[in-house]
Image (cartoon, grey):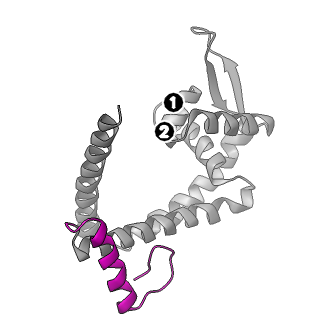
Amino acid sequence: MAGPHNETWNEEKEQRWITFVQSINSEISPQAVRLIGEMRKAAYAMHHIGQASIAPSGLSHAQYMVLMSLYVGEQVDGRAELNPSEISERLGNSRNSTSSLIRGLEKDGLITRQLDENDRRKFKIRLADDGRDLVSTYSHKHISIVGGSFNQLTEAEQATLGQLLAKLTLKIEEARDRMEQETR
């Protein structure tokens, strides 16, 4: 098992980690602690695959994700333009971070920004041709690598994993919503 900092742990260290987590919340089972570690490792690996697949582009992962949001908007949603708030929400970034990314991508000629005709306080962001070409090339590579990893599971395993992740996500989102309500 890999621990919190992605090093290999022996059984003794794993048990100390479980004991530590249970000292914070005794209701968390040892298996749940192990699953948290496995989920973290999988997310970490997917993130690094994503970074490695786009490295030759010269884009940061965050820049690529802005371009990808616009590309998905075009290809899936049928929307050539998104406003910065929509991009921020899709990425789970702060509006300030997203605005900074947009400025840099605009400077590099990968996106365009224009005032919204209906609301002059807002901007509409769209992919420039160079941005579309770049994100198209690297999205194919990234999706092939990540999708190929999931293809190592049988269809039944994929279905089971999908159901379990959906259930887990629902519970995590419910907990997040409760926490947000408590802080209001």
| Amino acid type indicated by mark 2 | Arg
Q: Is residue 58 above or below residue 52?
A: above
Q: Quadrant of the C terminus?
A: top left
Location of residue 105 in the rendering, given as x and y in whole percent from the top left corner? 73, 39
Task: Determine whether label 2 and label 1 are within 8 Å by CB.
Answer: yes
Q: Quadrant of residue 156?
A: bottom left
| Amino acid type indicated by mark 1 | Glu
Of 161 and 72, which appears nearest the observer? 161
Location of residue 97 in the rendering, given as x and y in whole percent from the top left corner? 63, 39
Q: Can residue 164 be seen in the rendering of this structure?
A: yes
The residue tagged 2 is 90
Residue 5 part of the magenta segment: yes
The residue tagged 1 is 86
Q: Residues within 10 Å of mark 1 (few under 14, many from 20)?
A: some
Of 138 and 161, which appears nearest the observer? 161
- Mark 2: which secondary structure? helix
